[in-house]
Image (cartoon, rainbow, N blue to C red):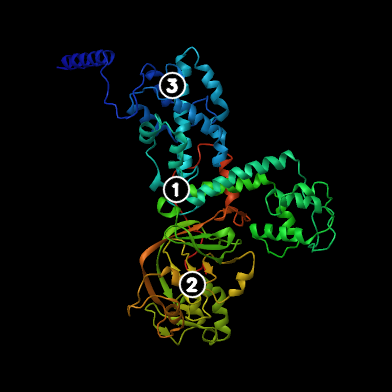
Amino acid sequence: MIRVSVRRVGTACVLGALLMVGGCRRHRKSTSAENTTDYAGNLQALVATKKLPSLRWPNFSDYQTAVTTFYDDRNYELAWTRDGKPTATALAFIAQFKDAAAKGLNPEDYDASLWAGRVQKLAGKPADAISEFDVAMTVNVMRYISDLRIGRVNPSHFNFDINVQSKKYNLAEFVSDHVVDATEVPKLIAGVEPDSEQYRQTEAALGHYLDLAKQQQDDDAQPLPMVENAVAVGEHYAAAPELLKRLRLEGDAPAEDATSDDKPVPHTFTKDLSEAVKHYQHRHGIEENGKLGPQTVKSLNVPLTERVVQLQDALERWRWLPDQYVNAPLMVNLPEFVLRGYGPDHKLDFKMKVVVGKVVGEHQTPVFAHMMRYLVFRPYWNVPVDIAKKELAPHIAADPGYLEKHNFEVTNGKHQVLTHYTAKQVGQGGVLVREKPGPKNSLGLVKFMFPNQYDIYLHSTPAPYLFDRSRRDFSHGCIRVQKPADLAVWALNGQLDKDKQPWDMDKVQTAFNNETQNNRTVLLKTPIPIVIFYVTAEVEDDGEVHFFDDIYGYDADLQGVLAKGPPYPAKPEPVVPKTQPGDTV
């Protein structure tokens, strides 16, 4: 019996080999035009290695599964050459790779400088060159499309709660069915990128700043001399001509006209220079006083090559956003200290200042995307036990009436107010401390809730004077809004209260001031997507580009990862919040 089985197996193998030679093939899954399988053995060997020495970044293990499936589905046919010559699609992608910098990507991540040599090696149709060209093109096309679709680095690597997986392509299928025979590659790429006007404006701004950076380097522009004290209108400034040239470069000062060619620029800080400086300050989040102070000079001396990097980082983060959030109605830009609200057509409805988490400690506001689901009018603030222990218990020990004097009350686990308690109970968490609702409450008169693992939300504040600062990182992580009543009216637009009355400004103010309805929750009829975002380069609707300081070092973190080259950390990682529940106000 054993001999018969072996014989049968052997016969089956021989028949299988004969069938393959005779042209019997697996079912082809790809919808692209058929190509030759003459190089199938070479392709299989190359794909199985997970490393291709001829690539700028040889390790393609992060794409190996997709590449294998791609070739399996087409029975290891060639994809990118016909009769020993690159297809029109392959040549179009080579052009895309060379111009990758215009997309905020590194051309060498896609072997931009190596393709000319690979094309030359195809002459004479050597099997090795044709096979390597094909696999190299597949790997780089997948890298390029994935990088434009979901970004290069998974945001969870930076502890950001943004799910890029929801818009991730099945690369093997997408490339095989939609890319290999594409006739309009630029149009295809535009469909891969975020469908966002802000993204497109940022990309356009990047092209402009690439030109400006080159111009600045060609001019060999030198840094402006630092000032000890702010220079005001009418005062001497030796580098006034250089300052004017620098301000003209980005359009903060009017361009030089033909009649001014021979007119020397005085070494004086003029009113016109002051107005140009003020415009520059407006674009860079600096106090708009029109004076040339140390902070302004330092900003002016940032090379435009660094502004290019800021725009590149902004594009990377735009690509992270899932489709439902890329045009979110509410967006907070942390380094700008600004909240924007958009209408259904994503036209700007409002813009207001915000206060965000402190740079020091573990209070930086994280980047994430969630759904705003409800508002709470006249909220309590529940004091975390560690804060009660460190900051309140010692005061209670010295003065048993301290909490009542400072707008706090104590409750048990059933939220029943207690009148008798000890400092020890407060310090050990045996009883709970909460701040009473009202205008003096740390959360103000309303909070806007989008439940998340960071315990971050928007709220009003009893300290509105902080909005007068140009830099506004003062909270423990939560986001304080400048115009809470306006935001409440906007969020509740189209909703009726329990009396069937619309939530207008009068109704919101009544909710603010009604002491008989504390901690009142109002559910949003339709949850609102909100993104807590981080871009240090932002383009206004009119195309004006604004830059901000990398307050949390998130840009530096991103650049540190990108500098190592592929494969980038692309797999989802656990998000571990640094903020402590309750301690984010």
Quarter of the image where one finds residue 470 = bottom right
Q: Amino acid at mark 1?
A: Asp
Question: Of label 3 and label 2, which has the lower sequence position?
Answer: 3
Q: Are marks 2 and 1 in contact (CB under 8 Å)?
A: no
Q: Amino acid at mark 2?
A: Asp
Q: How dense is the environment of label 3, judged by Cα within 10 Å: few (below 14), some, or many (20 and up)?
A: many
| 254 vs 397: above or below | above
**Location of mark 2 (residue):** 486
Question: Of label 2 and label 1, which has the lower sequence position?
Answer: 1
Give the CA separation, mark 1 to mark 3: 32 Å
Left or right of 244, for residue 199: left
Residue at x 48% of width, y 41% of height: 148
Quarter of the image where one finds residue 279 = bottom right
**Location of mark 3 (residue):** 81
Residue at x 74% of width, y 55% of height: 297
Residue at x 35% of width, y 78% of height: 501
Residue 194 at x, y percent in the picture: 46, 47
Left or right of 169, for residue 471: right
Return the residue nearer the eye: 520 or 93. Answer: 93
Q: How dense is the environment of label 2, judged by Cα within 10 Å: few (below 14), some, or many (20 and up)?
A: some
Residue 552 at x, y percent in the picture: 59, 56
Residue 571 at x, y percent in the picture: 44, 43
Give the CA separation, mark 2 to mark 1: 29 Å
Element assignment for label 2? helix
Name the disc covering residue 195, or none.
Answer: 1
Element assignment for label 3? strand
Question: Of label 1 and label 3, which has the lower sequence position?
Answer: 3
| 511 vs 533: above or below | below
Q: Amino acid at mark 3?
A: Thr
